Image (cartoon, grey):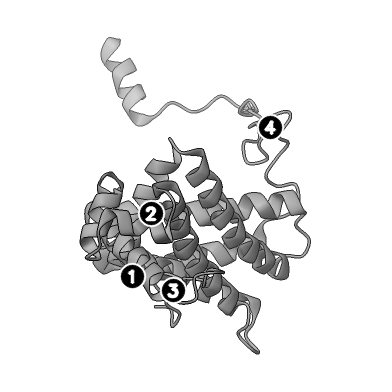
Amino acid sequence: MSKFTVPDLKITPREGYARGQEGIEQILRAAHRVLVEEGCAALTLRRIASECGLQVGNLNYYFRSKDELISALLDAIIGAYEDAFAEIGREPGESAERRLETYVGLILADITTKKTTRIFPELWALANVDPTVQTRVDAMYRRARAKLNQLIAELNPALPENERETLALFISASMEGLTIFAGYEKPWQPRMPWLERLACRSFIDLIKTLEPGQLGDLDSGASPWALPVELKPEPKSSRAQAPSPEAKQRAARKK
């Protein structure tokens, strides 16, 4: 599995809160615990204040509203992932293939953690009804795919940009989809090492062997893999086929 790990949060100091930075971190970590253990429905100011031992009114000193607090929490969660993705790109002397394996290992190892298995389905659900969350989640995945796009370009420089982007999306979605099957305490979690090896092998083979234009024409909807099969009539024999022994016996009985 990957040697990289993703911290729970990346909390950036806020201007004008030098003496209150410790309180900000306390609140955000409390909100993170509530999100992991109880889900988005429990993420209220009252519940967060209770978790970190403060009065609800005290939260307003640090965050003027629940939306501002949730926004800061999302920034802290997403920032931790962006730092991890950037770290992969700084591996000295590693080939693009090896860095792709590291990238895949990072994502799949993280999926098996409690925080990720619990948080991301909550974020996906929240993004369906909250445009702000949708924007932030999309931005995070866009940055993650940018790193993947870069690795694809190194492994297969002939692919045009739009095909690299589509391939990066396919690979990303394939890995994220394992959350519900092989995430924390999920039935297939013990087989995640196998799934990681399968993912690395199949992704690398796909990237290296995909040819420009092989995905087909978006306008026509034609697929180069769905080629029509030309049916040819079987050649007729120039001589009549000799009757089988069984046919001869049946003919003799009729006589």
Rounded to the nearest angstrom, the CA distance separating label 2 from label 3 is: 26 Å
Instruction: Kindly identify which residue carries mark 3.
Output: 21
Compared across the picture, whether 42 is left or right of 209 comes to left
Q: Residues within 10 Å of mark 2 (few under 14, many from 20)?
A: some
Q: Along the polypeptide, which appears first: circle 2 or circle 4?
A: 2
Q: Along the polypeptide, which appears first: circle 2 or circle 3?
A: 3
Rounded to the nearest angstrom, the CA distance separating label 1 from label 2 is: 22 Å
Circles 3 and 1, Cβ within 8 Å, touching? The answer is no
Q: Along the polypeptide, which appears first: circle 3 or circle 1?
A: 3
Instruction: Kindly identify which residue carries mark 1.
Output: 26
Residue at (28% x, 10% y) in the render:
254
Instruction: Kindly identify which residue carries mark 4.
Output: 222
Is 12 situated above or below 75?
Answer: below
Q: Determine which quarter of the picture holds residue 208.
A: bottom right
Q: Amino acid at mark 1?
A: Gln
Rounded to the nearest angstrom, the CA distance separating label 2 from label 4 is: 35 Å
Q: Along the polypeptide, which appears first: circle 3 or circle 4?
A: 3
Task: Kindly state the secondary structure of the residue where label 4 is placed.
Answer: loop
Q: Along the polypeptide, which appears first: circle 1 or circle 4?
A: 1
